[in-house]
Every structure is written in structure tokens, then in C-alpha cells.
Image (cartoon, rainbow, N blue to C red):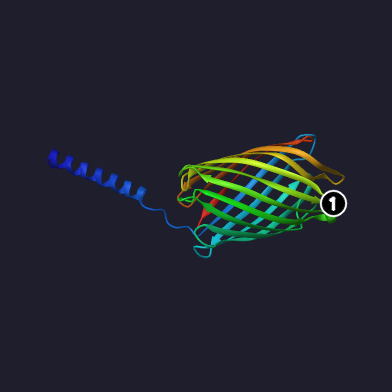
Amino acid sequence: MPRQRLCTRTAASVLLLLAGTVAAQEAPAPARRGQIDLTQRQSRYSANLPSGHATSLRGNWALSQDTVLNAELLSEKKFDARGGVAAFGATQTLDPDWFVSASLTRGWGGPNWARNRLDGAVSRKWGADRQLVTTLGAYRANFDAGRSDRGLRVSANYYLNHFVVLEGGATFNSSHPGKVRSQMPYLAVTLGSEGLQYLTLRASRGSEAYQSVGSAAQLVDFDSQSLSLDWRYWLAPDWGMTLHAERYLNPSYRRTTVGGGLFLQL
């Protein structure tokens, strides 16, 4: 075969391969109706407190374009006690600007897990491009020994562009007995895009009402702060991995948590 004809065919094959690659990259990703996350985390404590671990399974499924169901199952060991929660919720889009959500949680194992909890929230999108989303939520939780929490949650998410999301919010809580009030504001920034990766940095600093750190020890009305980093990375179009790191501090102890997991989009 003449060299010129061979070079022409080779060049044409390369061009076709490049064209196919570009077309594949530009083709829209298939619509996903659901997602499953499985994560495992390990925690180390100061002040001679025992280490802990947690395993969680979370998922969501779109019944329609406007209705999404979600569920979570958490098993945890913390301060030498074993417990967990099972939660089920739904998010309903009302119109292009408004959506609402609600969830019911049942727990077991001790004073650090709510026996039952009910959450509800309403969200509003603002702006011509709906880049700002504000949320107002409320909750009520009951624990062992007659303790209960109730409070409000406020937050705002601003989609700066297709790569950066800014978030801020706070939780205002009232606990009984004693009507102990606490508040926990936070700030977060997320970088990345769907199908590639997300990196989220979150910081919080405020107060907490109650926390049991053993069978005969309980912290009441104390300050705390935390800094966490989460990485979500797609290894393929429909699945990937997650990594988590967190540092938590209060006047009584320090906690370092690391973990990871896998997710699958359906």
C-alpha cells in the first residue's frame, strides 16, 4: 500500500477516534433516579475515653421529578455504648421556587441517640437563576430519662457558579430538663461538579446542651467547635468513593475522626 494512502487512513482513524471521544464527553449523563452510600468511620478520643466507630447506609430514590424518598440506617459505638438510628424521609417540590421536606427517626442504645425525632423544613429558591436557596426547619426529639430537644434550623446556600457553593446556617436548640439553650452556627464551602468530584470544608463553633460520655458522666451546657473535610470522587460514571476527616474539640476532650466509603448511583 502506498505510504501516502496509509498515512491518510491513519490520520482519518485518529480523527474519528478523537471525534468519538469528544462526543462521549459532551453527551449528557444519563438521568439517575437513586443513590446508595455506605460509609465507615473510626474515632479517637483524648482524656482516656474509649475509641468509637460508626457504620451508615444511606439511600435516596426519586419516585417522580418532584418527589424524592430518602432513608438512613446508622450503627454506632460511642463512649463504650452501642446504639444507632433508623430514619425515613421525603422531599417534595411544590413549584419551581418552593420545596418541603420531612423525616422521622427512631433510635436505640442510650442517651446519645434520640428514641424518636421528627424534622420538617421548607425551602425557597431566590433570584433569576435561583442561585440562592434558603431553608427554615424545626425538629423535636425525645431521649432516655425524660430528656427532650426542640429547635429551629436556618441555612442559606449560594451557588456562586457551576463549581463553587457557599453555605451558612445555625441550629438553635432548647433542651429539657432545665431548659438549657444552645446554638451552633456553621460555614461551609463546596468545590467541584457532579460526575467528577466534590470537596467540602465545613467549620462550626457554638454550644451544646447535653452529652453523655459514660454511664455516670454527662456534659451539660458547654462550648464546642469542629472542622471537617469531605471528598467525593467518581471512579466511574455511576459509582465512586468518599473520604472524611474531622477534628472536634470541647473543654473536656478532643476527638479525631477519619473514614471513607463507596457510593453507587442508580
Apparent side of residue 245 relative to residue 193 in the rendered image (left or right): right
Image-based side of 120 in relation to 61, left or right:
right
Of all residues, the one furthest to the bottom in this rendering is 63
183 left or right, relative to 196? right
Tell me the residue that label 1 is attached to.
Answer: 177
Instruction: Give the percent coordinates (x, y) of residue 171.
Output: 69, 47
Give the percent coordinates (x, y) of residue 48: 80, 35
Residue 115, above or below 50: below
List the single residue furthest toward the front.
127
Say which of 15 and 131 sits in front: 131
For the view shown, which residue lies furthest in the left direction?
Answer: 2
Left of 178 or right of it: where is 138? left
Task: Work out whether residue 79 or residue 87 is closer to the camera in this orientation and state it.
Answer: 87
Residue at point 18%, 39% (across, down):
7
Q: Determine the secondary structure under disc 1.
A: loop
Relative image position of residue 28 (x, y in whole percent): 39, 53
Tell me which residue sits at (58%, 47%) in the image.
Answer: 156
Residue at left offset 72%, top offset 49%: 76
Q: Which of 9 and 98 is in front in this view?
A: 98
Give the quarter of the image for residue 183.
Answer: top right
Nearest the viewer among 20 and 211 is 211
Q: Quadrant of residue 224?
A: top right
Which residue of the protein is positioned furthest toward the right in this rendering? 216
The type of residue carrying mark 1 is: Pro
**Residue 100 screen position, x and y as percent:** 59, 59
In the rendered view of the protein, which quadrant contains the N terminus? top left
Q: How crowded is mark 1: few (under 14 residues within 10 Å), some or many (20 or more)?
A: few
| Total numbered circles | 1
